[in-house]
């Protein structure tokens, strides 16, 4: 059992004080009956509470998860081919979803949340958070090709990629930092200069990194990390 005003507040509809005013002014009903007196308790699991004629339900606790995605997992909530999904790796009671995507065979950092607003911020093309990848190609890539990747290359559909930061680590190993998130973008960028990516791992989302997180494991983002990502996306 829970006090009606507390229940209304937990639905995100109002502060507790404002909820009391809503009750007093006859805007709230429980199981179809308007309640105007204070101090009424309700059964939060079985009673139906309406505000201005609309059913209200408690908001789910917002959760923010960082997963180290292994190869072989899809980032969609379910897969027609029955392949395992990243949701199989994250055992939380909340209904979380991945923010953006990683290819089946791409590894690395992936955020999952049930906060739609947060996810929209991160994925909005205007604010899109930079992502860094480690890529290993089948063949060496020369400096002139890297320069093309830095300036922008034409990939499928005539899309020209924005300037990217590309750092050579070895003849066929690179760090690539991009802003956009077109499907299979890094793979297609290398294809555009004649190289095939054999291994791809996302190593950073903005400045968010975690080299300790083991493949297939997850952890909650800290409050600072959530704030950082929120601000990162909104300040660009
Ligand atoms: N670029 C790709 O090619 N694949 C990914 O999964 C992410 C970025």
Image (tube, rainbow, N blue to C red):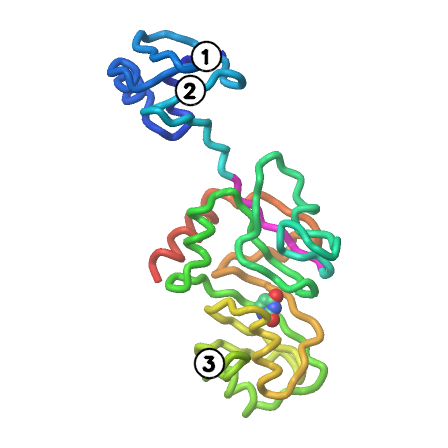
Helix, strand or loop under label 1: strand
Mark 3 and mark 1 lie on one chain; the one further toward the N terminus is 1
Between the residue at mark 3 and the residue at mark 1, the CA separation in whole angstroms equals 58 Å
Query: In the displayed structure, does residue 100 sit left or right of residue 11?
Result: right
Magenta stretch: give its range: 63-70
Examine the rendered structure and indicate whether residue 192 appears above or below residue 229: below
x and y percentages locating residue 220 in the rendered image: 57, 43
Q: Residues within 10 Å of mark 2 (few under 14, many from 20)?
A: many
x and y percentages locating residue 195 in the rendered image: 65, 84
Examine the rendered structure and indicate whether residue 229 appears above or below residue 59: below
Q: What residue did someone put label 3 on?
A: 160
Mark 2 and mark 1 lie on one chain; the one further toward the N terminus is 1
Which quadrant would the C terminus be assigned to in this image?
Answer: bottom left
Query: In the displayed structure, does residue 163 sit left or right of residue 92?
Result: left
What number is the disc on residue 42?
1
When asked about the image quadrant of residue 175, the answer is bottom right
Q: What residue did someone put label 2 on?
A: 49
- CB contact under 8 Å: marks 2 and 1: yes
């Amino acid at each position: 059992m829970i006090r009606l005003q507390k229940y209304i507040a937990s639905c995100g509809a109002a502060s507790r004080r404002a909820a009391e005013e809503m009750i007093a002014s006859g805007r709230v009903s429980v199981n179809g009956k308007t309640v105007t007196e204070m101090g009424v308790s309700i059964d939060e699991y079985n009673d139906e509470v309406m505000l201005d004629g609309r059913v209200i339900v408690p908001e789910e606790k917002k959760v923010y998860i960082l997963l180290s995605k292994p190869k072989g997992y899809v980032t969609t909530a379910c897969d027609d081919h029955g392949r395992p999904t990243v949701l199989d790796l994250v055992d939380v009671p909340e209904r979380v979803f991945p923010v953006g995507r990683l290819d089946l065979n791409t590894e690395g950092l992936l955020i999952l949340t049930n906060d739609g607003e947060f996810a929209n911020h991160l994925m909005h093309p205007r604010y899109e958070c930079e992502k860094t990848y480690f890529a290993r190609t089948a063949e060496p890539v020369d400096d002139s090709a890297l320069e093309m990747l830095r300036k922008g290359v034409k990939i499928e559909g005539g899309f020209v990629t924005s300037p990217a930061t590309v750092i050579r680590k070895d003849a066929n190993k690179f760090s690539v930092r991009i802003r956009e998130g077109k499907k299979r973008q890094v793979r297609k960028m290398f294809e555009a200069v004649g190289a095939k990516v054999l291994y791809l791992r996302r190593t950073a989302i903005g400045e968010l990194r975690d080299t300790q997180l083991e493949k297939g494991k997850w952890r909650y983002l800290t409050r600072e990390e959530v704030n950082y990502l929120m601000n990162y996306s909104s300040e660009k």
